[in-house]
Image (cartoon, helix red, strand yellow):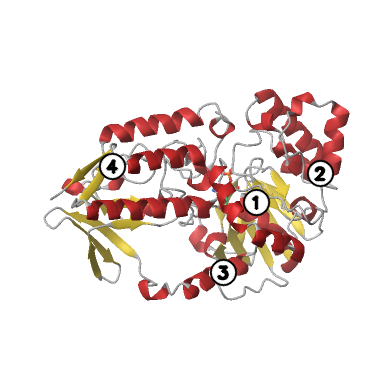
Amino acid sequence: MFSAQDDILRYANHVADRFDLRRDMQFNTRIRSVEWMEGTQQWRLTSEANERFEAPFCVMATGCLSVPVKPEIEGAARFAGEVYHTGSWPTEPVDLAHKRVGIIGTGSSGVQAIPELARMAGQLTVFQRTPVYTMPANRKRMRDAVQAEFREHYRDIRALQQQNAGGVSNFRPRKSVARTDDGPRVPMRLLDLTPEQREAVLQRQGLGALLAFRDVNSDAQANALANDLYRATVRRMIRDPSTAERLLPKTYGLGCKRQVLDRDYYETFNRDNVTLVDLAETPIETITERGVRTAAAHHELDVLIYATGFDAMTGALLRANIRGREGIGLAEKWADGPVAYLGLQMAGFPNLFTVTGPGSPSVLCNMIVAIEQHVNWIGDCITHLRSTGQRTIEPRPESEQAWIAHVNEVAEGTMYTAPTCNSWYLGANIPGKPRIFMPYVGGFPRYRDRCETEATNSYPGFVLGSA
Ligand code: NA7
């Protein structure tokens, strides 16, 4: 359960080989511009090596979290030690033994890297700007009996994924007795439990149990209670009370940011070789040749690791320099935030498709399920155009506007968009990026039905052109 990066990479390579996909792939090719040629009704892509490619359709499958970002910190270029970003970690092993390592950032990447780094490094200094809510991942080896049952029910699992808001099956093996109690199957309300019952649930199931209560994500009072229970539990896990206080999130609630899962995160701060620096108290003033200077101290480092996240959802699309009809750039169209229909297409950009684009379930759905649905929809759409003698498709501007209004409406009132919440879902991690909730929170089945209605009715929300 919870495959590691090397497992997932091996699986991706296996799929590429098994289905003979490599003959259609060109690696190490960064596209620097994507232009619509009105005369030929083709997209022209130009690579950094000035190779040109022309095609009637262009599918941007550029990923939601594929552009790592480093904050601009004064003096950063001066640092003479090794520098890494968690999102572009080298493929060759990095030797950290006996080194003084610093890490900036405590999102998923930081939280998951910190315990590993603490085991490998001589000293680890964690620079934390905002504390995080993190739950134990309970990563464990999948037992053979469990795996056999997943295989046996493979088709049912795929069908169940289609019916679930997050594209997950929630399949639980029956034959093998689950060794841990994973929590209530039917979500209960936290507010319905007595204090003793709450304590018993936490004791039995750990912190992750808080996420199983349906009111924690929808009711401010339940959310505040869950946040208190979370903090009380974490206080008991950390030996040094002042470190514990610094690690506790207090300015926002559970459910605002993408849920982080960890292994041994809090326990790591009980190690002698780990130091927490709270940037809220002592901000970074500058990076020097030999380390990081905060308002309180100079931290000498051999290695500096940025776990500072990604320009999410729109970053890769905006960097590709896409120009549609009349040479209008995507950056111009999206100056106030991403505008697209169903997260699949943009008015003014005919025959350009985005896979898991902003305004689609994307990162709020099992990504494989979301990607598969988009790829199938795009494939069917191109087949439809070809079989009906049409050459172009793009959304009607009014469809885009109505969809954006709906995307905003369903996000309204959720913990994701609470005024105290800052997350990459909102673009809040990138200075100057418009604050817009980018993924579609209305659930995968509802979204898929909407896409299917478009296809079965010959795309009424789009304009189709024959020449
Ligand atoms: P995230 O979740 O965006 O986290 C980035 C972290 O870096 C977060 O703790 C930030 O603090 C911190 N950060 C960013 N800029 C700075 C500066 N200038 N100074 C100090 N700290 C900073 O990225 P991840 O890579 O962890 O995870 C992204 C997704 O990948 C994750 O949700 C999973 O879906 C996989 P902040 O909270 O902004 O104060």
Q: Nearer the viewer, residue 63 or 16?
A: 16
Q: Is residue 340 visible?
A: no
Position of 274 relative to 218 (above/below)? below
Q: How far apart, in angstroms, are the residues tagged by discs 3 and 1?
A: 34 Å
Measuring from the top left, give residue 62's x and y in whole percent: 41, 57
Foreground: disc 3 or disc 1: 3
The first of marks 2 and 1 along the sequence is: 1
Which secondary structure lies at badge 4?
A: loop
How busy is the neighbourhood of tag 3: few (under 14 within 10 Å), some, or many (20 plus)? Answer: few
Q: Which residue matches tag 3?
A: 11
Residue that carries the numbered disc 2 in the rendered image: 205
Q: Please state the horizontal and vertical placement of residue 284, each as a whole percent of the image.
A: 59, 48
Alpha carbon separation for disc pair 3 and 2: 31 Å
Q: Given this view, does label 1 or label 4 mark the residue nearer the observer?
A: 4
Tell me the residue that label 4 is attached to. 458
Q: Quadrant of residue 183?
A: top right
Sequence order check, earlier mark of 4 and 3? 3
